[in-house]
Image: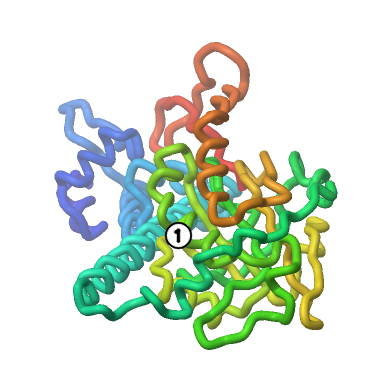
Amino acid sequence: MRIGELARRAGTTVKAVRYYESLGLIAPARLANGYRDCTGDDVRLVREIRSLHGLGIPVERTRPFLECLAAGSAHADDCPASLASYREAIDELGERIEALTARRATLITQLNAAAHRGSGAGASGSRAEDYLTLPADLPAPEADGAAGHLPGTRMPGLALPGTAGRAVRLDRLGSRRAVIYVYPLTGRPGTDLPEGWNSIPGARGCTAEACGFRDHFRDLLEAGAGRVFGLSSQDAGYQSELVERLGLPFAVLSDPAFDLAEALGLPTFEAGGTRLYKRLTMIVRDGVIEHVFHPVFPPDQHAEQVLTWLRENPPAEPAVRGGAGAPPSRRKPGGGTAPAAPMVPA
């Protein structure tokens, strides 16, 4: 069949088919007169490209799926490379969702500030301000070495609920650095904290710490952080209220069962008969804990400490796989050869 018939059967345009051909995704045979001689296999490839594009996978990144079909698989996603491409697309969508959530939180903060400007209303003079002002004699936690085993450890395959509306897989946070600050308990206006909270080293200051990460959020991203998360044992509803009230531009994760503590051996303590996380921060890259801050003090300045570390420790460039030289060639779905695409971790 000619290219026009191929386009009609695949439900697309001739221009689109020519674009796919220019990328090497399809390679119809040529007749002696130069016309394309398209087949049913070409129709199947074009339909697959359109289907994947409808799922949000860019046309240029459909090659693993087409190669899976060309290798004789019944489905384009029967191959490991196809599954890796799915995961990569899902991770990118997750980052976009979080970015939009952060933008929404920033707009809410701006709206609240503008609405209360000059009205005398708002948090000033209320109990909310109490959580942001730390006592001058706040006791500092001791360096107990409870997190010394963490650097170099792989993150477990846990999925914790987050305030962005989806669970977050801790072992799939991407190749850019993720900042996860773990804290004991955020206070809420009108709700009493555990008795003697101010006298427990490392307990007080969670709200002030969260506001620090909020205020330095853009600085952290510019310094190389790909994502920022808060994490505590409080339930998802409590965390959502916190994000809304403080206008946090990042997701806060909930781990009431202390699954992460059990998987990594994270330090905890008890207050008022309740088990809580000790404060620490992990820098995670490619699923591995790169650096840990513990103990953390003072909490209201911790975001600046993390920011300074990121600026002073730029990530090393990843090693080139396969050594020096040009990458090996491989067969295109429709014939010919194309440079091998980089492998994507599954």
Give the residue at x 15% y 47%: 14
x and y percentages locating residue 215 in the rendered image:
41, 54
In this view of the protein, can residue 254 be seen by the observer? yes
Give the residue at x 50% y 23%: 329
Residue 57 lies, with reference to residue 133, above or below; the image says above
Relative horizontal placement of residue 112, taking residue 71 as reference (left or right): left
Dividing the picture into quadrants, the one containing residue 30 is top left
Q: Nearer the viewer, residue 253 or 184?
A: 184
Q: Amino acid under label 1?
A: Gly
Dividing the picture into quadrants, the one containing residue 122 is bottom left
x and y percentages locating residue 326 in the rendered image:
50, 15
The residue most toward the top is 325
Give the residue at x 22% y 36%: 36
In this view of the protein, can residue 74 be seen by the observer? no
Dividing the picture into quadrants, the one containing residue 33 is top left
x and y percentages locating residue 57 in the rendered image:
38, 53
Relative horizontal placement of residue 339, taking residue 159 as reference (left or right): left
Give the residue at x 50% y 82%: 189
According to the picture, the residue beneath numbered tag 1 turns out to be 94
| Count of numbered circles on the image | 1
